[in-house]
Image (cartoon, grey):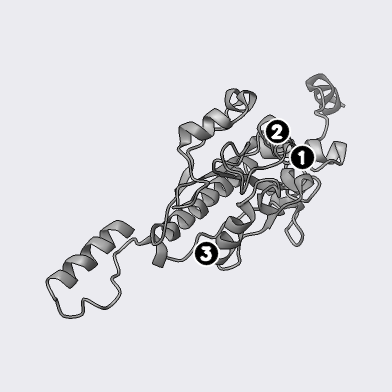
Amino acid sequence: MCSMRLLIAELLRAWKAPGAERPIFLPGDLCRSPPPQLATKRTWHLCYSRDNEGAAELVARLERASEQQLRATADAEQMRSSAALLLYLDGATFGGDGLPDRSKDGAASEGLVRLVRRALDDGIPMVLVHEQRSVPEAVSFDEIIRRTPAELVSAGIYRPIATPLLDEPHAAVAVRLVLNNLDLICRRIERHNSGVIGSLTALAESLTRIDMDGDGEIGNSPTRSSEHAPGSASKPRLKWRRRTPPEKVASASCV
């Protein structure tokens, strides 16, 4: 959509059409439509690692594009309370071969590997962003896979499709695509929690007093019956009476 708008703008300027200098709006343009709601009961939308250099800058841009709706944390202990883990991918993500300016030390790389491994083990959705702007750290995706630890590749780290982060003006579209992807993840989580599994999770939380779904509440699942909701009318309970055997009824009538 962004490329089509640029093409139309160049054509209008070449034809010297009236109003060619004005901004062009195309129906369905991501950059001009309202940002997604990102509705979730999770405490955070995104968790990211400080060891993932470049992720904090990307999160700041996502926050601006979401009109400050996005809630993000760099605390690894909050990952289970987050809808997804953000992973910013460039040549230095898992080791900076040939990139002395931004090469990561071994401790930082190991910390990021541990966090990603834990996310994969716990089933935390991942949002991948591939750096493709005109920067020295940008490398092909094949090269990123080559530098990624084999254990993470085999565990499915690249099963989700990565969003390419391109130069302006395409970068704004990429940011909106990341937000839309995150919105889909939030919707999927809410649908998951509103079914039978959500009811079982709420029951397990009530028994163990452990927040298993990361919504910050114990047993307070949206699938609770409305009869337990504050202000709702309670359903009348049926009273069962023992049925009198037919022979006793007959003997009583004879008397």
Give the amino acid at mark 3.
Ala
**Real-space Cα distance between discs 2 and 1?**
11 Å
Give the amino acid at mark 1.
Met
| 50 and 80: which is toward the camera | 50
The label nearer to you, 3 versus 2, is 3
- For disc 2, the neighbor class at 10 Å (few under 14, some 14 to 19, many from 20) is few
Looking at this rendering, what residue extends furthest in the bottom direction?
A: 18
Give the left or right position of residue 148, taking residue 238 as reference.
left
Give the left or right position of residue 230, taking residue 90 as reference.
right
**Real-space Cα distance between discs 1 and 3?**
30 Å
Q: Which mark is residue 166?
A: none
- Residue 15, position as x, y percentages in the image: 12, 71
Q: Residue at x 84, y 40 (%)?
A: 210
First-in-chain label (1 vs 3): 3
Residue matched to label 2:
122
Residue matched to label 3:
65
Q: Residue at x 33, y 59 (%)?
A: 2
> Tag 2, which secondary structure?
helix
Quadrant of the image for the N terminus? bottom left
> Tag 3, which secondary structure?
helix
Q: Which mark is residue 212?
A: 1
